[in-house]
Amino acid sequence: MLLYWILLPIVWVLAHIVFRIQVIGRENLKAVRDGRAYVIAPNHIANLDPVLIAITIFDWKRLRILAKEELFKNPLAGWFLRCMGAVSIERGKGDTVTLEKITNECKNGTGVMIFPEGTRTKTGKLGMIKSGAFVIAAAAGADMLPVRIIYGTKDGRLHLFCKVRIVFGEAIPAADLQIKDQSHKIAELRRMKNRLKDELEALLKANAFDVQAAETVEADDPAPKAAEKAKPAGEPKPAAQPAEAAQPAEKPALPEAAEGETQGA
């Protein structure tokens, strides 16, 4: 824990030297940091996402960050991640022991960061939302805070010295994350996923950089495509003129001998 307090300010300074970080919606973060259980649900583009969000939150009470097991294979990276509060989880293997431990910590007021997509989306666009974040939030009775991390590059990916926006949306109340009817659990989870997806998409649309805003508007507005379809075709080609009717062949002139024979008949 002592190393966390030492590392957090150092990483904060380094990150603000390498990137131009802007935070939006900090008041929404403060609303959940009052001792209540809360789950932070950001989109995921780069391996540095959890670090940038953690230093933005800058909570002296260390966050718990669920990270894939592969990131801990490098000894130095694993040491750093553990110091920052990351917990290794085996994806796709039902790591119930880790999930129960994290859920109990969340119940006691520790913030938990879990990426609902479960993996990075290298295009910068939102991937498919999975159930893990909702299971933890429901079990812990936690609010869920949507967070959109936006990189100010045309391809939406992280580059050195690029601008970064970290946008905290309004929290989804714990009451809205409870599965009230177990017989409709799948439908309830689908409803929650759609709500979080809509929230994250809205945060991007409202806070995109100029290089991304044009693409977002073009994708959402079908008018240009409709106009293209409605555009009249070029001048119609004139109809082919009918060929002149063939004139009947003239009666061939008979030779003089033939005429004489005919007359004499």
Image (cartoon, helix red, strand yellow):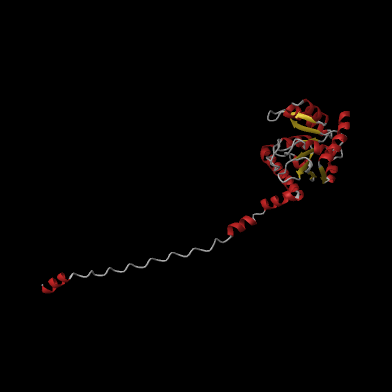
Q: Nearer the viewer, residue 202 or 101?
A: 202
Q: Is residue 1 visible?
A: no
Q: Nearer the viewer, residue 201 or 263?
A: 263
What percent of the width, then of the height, locates residue 258? 15, 69
The residue that appears at 88% across and 35% down in the rendered structure is 9
From this view, report whether residue 156 is shown above or below residue 263. Answer: above
- Tell whether 13 sits left or right of 117: right
Q: Quadrant of residue 121?
A: top right
- Tell whether 112 sits left or right of 215: right
Q: Quadrant of residue 73?
A: top right
User: Which quadrant is the C terminus positioned in?
Assistant: bottom left
The residue that appears at 26% across and 70% down in the rendered structure is 250
What percent of the width, then of the height, locates residue 225? 62, 55
Q: Quadrant of residue 98?
A: top right
Q: Residue furthest front?
A: 256
What percent of the width, then of the height, locates residue 35? 86, 37
From this view, report whether residue 152 is shown above or below residue 89. Answer: below
- Tell whether 137 sits left or right of 225: right
What percent of the width, then of the height, locates residue 196? 73, 43
